[in-house]
Amino acid sequence: SAKQHGRNQFAFFQPQMTEEIREHLEIQQGIKEAIDKDYLYLDYQPLYSMESGEIIGAEALLRWQHPINGLLSPARFIPIIEESDLIEEVTRWVANRAGRDLQKILGLREQFSMSINISGAALHQMEMCDYICHLKQKLALPDNSLCIEITETSMISHLDSCEAVLRRWKQAGIEIWIDDFGTGYSSLAYLNSLSIDGLKIDQSFVHNLIDGHSRPLIDAMIALADSLSISTVAEGIETDRQHAELKAMGVEYAQGFGLARPMRIDSLIELLDDEHRNAEALAEP
Ligand code: C2E
Ligand code: MG
Ligand code: MG
Ligand code: MG
């Protein structure tokens, strides 16, 4: 009967709900401790120029090494932290750490572009915007060396309020890239009115390039970027074939496990050193 069905449903759902609430609480309470005790760290995934094959930058990706639960993925804990003010503290931590590591890298090579991911919640906070501008100034980071990635979905849901924030970042010499582009069911009008520097073509399109039907969509995204004079990155490149095709199609920058996995700062600096040594060896007569 319906009544019985309802009772079963109740019995089935309740423990699951409790589990979800427990997880949310655990993550929200744990993140402060994680910041204080240095359980957070950043991995950096290199970004390559399609044309030269050289590393031109990296994206900072947040990691939480939990003492009991092991390594937690940002895809799991960021959305939960975004429900509260804690996301602000986490964002400041990420910006500081990535900013200082960028400073370190800029001591070794003249040009480098460091991307950080900013959650949509920060898009209407002038305070967070100013904080990042001041950080750039404090660390004396050159213009266009610091990039902010905002997912298309969060951009769309904060469209009214984000224009002033994006303009301020732009004026401060901070680049703005649209992350996971093509997944947001967007009106494209916002691309023209906002201060956008580039599109990161979502990895789902890259994965469906060879066997799937995403080629015309990627072509359209490249044409759109070209007509707006903004850049393109293909995310999630795993194979040589994908890399070659995307290069031939006109994508400017490449990122993916097939080129380099996210890594600790020491490994990134080693990789940059190797690249530098190889370039010098090639230049020798
Ligand atoms: P995202 O910004 O789109 O970052 C790319 C994600 O794809 C990363 O996952 C990266 O490890 C993964 N990836 C890169 N290349 C490949 C590939 O070839 N194949 C596959 N299958 N995956 C690849 P990750 O590090 O787990 O991050 C997931 C998401 O969490 C990020 O997506 C970003 O939206 C969010 N996130 C990460 N760090 C932060 C942060 O500091 N702040 C905020 N607000 N969000 C962050
Ligand atoms: Mg990103
Ligand atoms: Mg992405
Ligand atoms: Mg993504």
Image (cartoon, grey):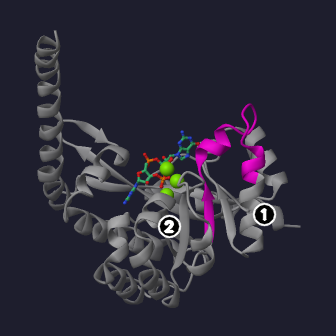
Q: What is the number of the mark on residue 260?
A: none
* Contact flag, marks 1 and 2 (Cβ < 8 Å): no
Which residue sits at x=21%, y=36%? 69
Query: Residue 99 location, x and y as percent?
Result: 41, 74
Residue segment shown in magenta: 198-218
112 and 109: which is toward the camera: 112
Q: Secondary structure at mark 2?
A: strand
Q: Which residue is mark 2?
A: 115
Q: Residues within 10 Å of mark 2 (few under 14, many from 20)?
A: many
User: Which amino acid does the dot numbered 2 rest on?
Assistant: Ser
Look at the picture and state if 4 lies above or below 149. above
User: Which amino acid does the dot numbered 1 rest on?
Assistant: Ala
Q: Quadrant of the N terminus?
A: top left
236 and 158: which is toward the camera: 158
Query: Residue 283 location, x and y as percent?
Result: 82, 67
- Asked whether residue 237 appears in the rendered view, the answer is no
Residue at the far top in the pictured view: 1
Q: Earlier in the sequence, mark 1 or mark 2?
A: 2
Q: Which residue is mark 1?
A: 223
Is 203 in the magenta?
yes
Look at the picture and state if 123 lies above or below 200. below
Which residue sits at x=47%, y=72%? 102
